[in-house]
Image (cartoon, rainbow, N blue to C red):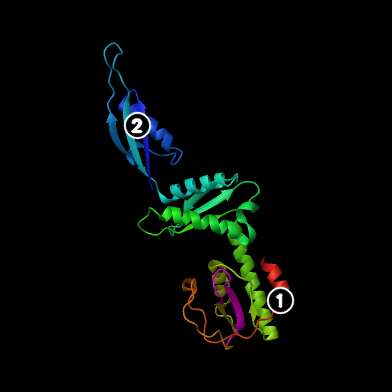
Amino acid sequence: MIKTVEATGKTTDDAVAAALRSLMEINPDITEADVEVELLERARAGFLGIGSCNAKVRVTYEMKPLENAKIFLSGLLERIGVSGFVDGEVTEEGTVALNITGENMGVVIGRRGDTLDALQYITSIVVNRTEKEHVRVTVDTENYRKKREESLEALARKVAGRVLKYKKNVTLEPMNANERRVIHSTLQGMRGITTYSMGNEPNRRVVVALAGARGPRSRGPQRGNHSERPERTTAEPPKAASIPTVEEEWK
């Protein structure tokens, strides 16, 4: 994303310095080497003060994805009335990882992380709008995503144990693609257990089943399923057992 600032000063150097000060909100360590400077008007001393004018410059700065993401998310939180500080880093994998701190972060998380996922989705769209290559963006607060992942892993193992004990498949409540992926990954390779997804977004669910049991009959490709392949889709599943206590645990 390109950020452009115009500034004036008694000299060209003063005008550039003023522009850089305004850009320090984006990058506190910004220097003249990081920007392009266009001289719009030279300073003139005039005669006896008559006809004098300040120098005017236009400074252009190409914001990095992390800077763009932090500014956008901070502004978005302010617009929806949430008081929070946004910090972040670029991981070794190149992911822009943002973290929100503040009071009452439950509002930011939302029901089962729905609000947090929405903030992440919107921020990712804005950041990638000006990038040539896709940049992965994550948004978290109070280490929610790690805790949620651990909770889902525990749920997956517990449900698998019940499937093996009662010899009956279990269909979990709807989850987003990332959460379904956690369930699939946790139970991958577990002896006697297989998993697949059924239904359409946003009501797509994971089924934890006995290995070798018939899966759902193929009905052509389903929207939203590409990121989770392979998912078994070969035959109608038997009716899933309803286990309210399990569903309560992963809420």
Helix, strand or loop for disc 2: helix
Nearest the camera: 119 or 93?
A: 119
Check residue 19 in the rendering and tell me which mark sits there, or answer none. Answer: none
- Report the amino acid beneath label 1: Ile
Residue indicated by mark 1? 243
Q: Is residue 74 left or right of residue 36?
A: right
Q: Are marks 2 and 1 in contact (CB under 8 Å)?
A: no
Can the viewer see residue 228 in this picture?
A: yes
Callout 1: few (<14), some (14-19), or many (20+) C-alpha neighbours within 10 Å?
few
Which range is magenta?
198-211
- Above or below residue 72? Residue 199 is below
Image point 69% across, 71% down: which residue?
A: 247
Residue indicated by mark 2? 16
* Inter-mark Cα distance, 2 to 1: 66 Å
Image coords of residue 243 (percent x, y)? 71, 76
Q: Is residue 109 left or right of residue 64?
A: right
Q: Earlier in the sequence, mark 2 or mark 1?
A: 2
- Report the amino acid beneath label 2: Val
Q: Is residue 228 magenta?
A: no
Q: Is residue 204 magenta?
A: yes
Image point 63% across, 57% down: which residue?
A: 110
Residue 5, by quadrant, is: top left
Callout 2: few (<14), some (14-19), or many (20+) C-alpha neighbours within 10 Å?
many
